[in-house]
Amino acid sequence: MGLHQPQASACVARLAQVDDALIARLLGQFDWRSRTTGAYLAALTGQGTFTDQLGGLLLVSEVCYAGSAYCLALAVFDTPASRDYLHRYLEHYLRQPQLYFDQEQAMAVIAWLDGQHGRDEAARHAPAWTGFAASRPGLVLDDALAAFAASMDACAPCKLSGRPLSNPQEILVKF
């Protein structure tokens, strides 16, 4: 399975056509599929200019299923602003156990970023996380962290030398 050279070339050609207007249009739709696609495209193309829009969408959590893509994009951007949105999300939604949205993904992102940078920002959410997780039998942060790490590994071909993808043709180097 996986992408073979012809499919990879077609994918890269389409990715090269992604611009801010397309991402903004996708994120502006009230549909989880469009918003998820917009978030992934922003992440894959390193469009950190969408940090505020993605962070705002995460905070309001209007549609289901898209939050994990918002979290992934914010992690890829890995800026103080993107981390702030994740912290604000956790500060609000970990105290709302009746709202089981993307708390698990957001907490995994913060823990993953901590591991990447030798920080311990997740500790500030530990008491609230413990209370939230108690209301969700089987919820284990280590499992969420492993799943998120796998997602970031899947994004690795789209980044070279730790920088966002600026030339989509670079993807072919990894295939």
Image (spheres, rainbow, N blue to C red):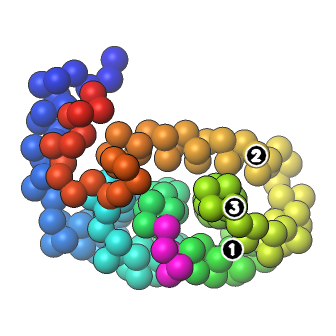
Which tag is nearer the camera, tag 1 or tag 3? Answer: 3
- Mark with earlier residue (2, 3): 3
- Looking at numbered disc 2 in the image, what kind of residue is underneath it? Asp
Position of residue 170 measured from the top left corner of the image (x, y, whole percent): 21, 43
Position of residue 40 measured from the top left corner of the image (x, y, whole percent): 35, 55
Residue underneath mark 2: 142
- Looking at numbered disc 3 in the image, what kind of residue is underneath it? Gly
Label 2, secondary structure: give it. Answer: helix
Position of residue 100 measured from the top left corner of the image (x, y, whole percent): 69, 63
- Mark with earlier residue (2, 1): 1
- Looking at numbered disc 1 in the image, what kind of residue is underneath it? Leu
Q: What segment carries the magenta color?
A: 78-82
Q: Quadrant of residue 134?
A: bottom right
Residue underneath mark 3: 118
Between the residue at mark 2 and the residue at mark 1, the CA separation in whole angstroms equals 17 Å
Q: Quadrant of residue 96?
A: bottom right
- Is 69 within the magenta? no
Between the residue at mark 1 and the residue at mark 3, the CA separation in whole angstroms equals 20 Å
The secondary structure that dominates the magenta segment is helix
* Mark sitting on residue 90: 1
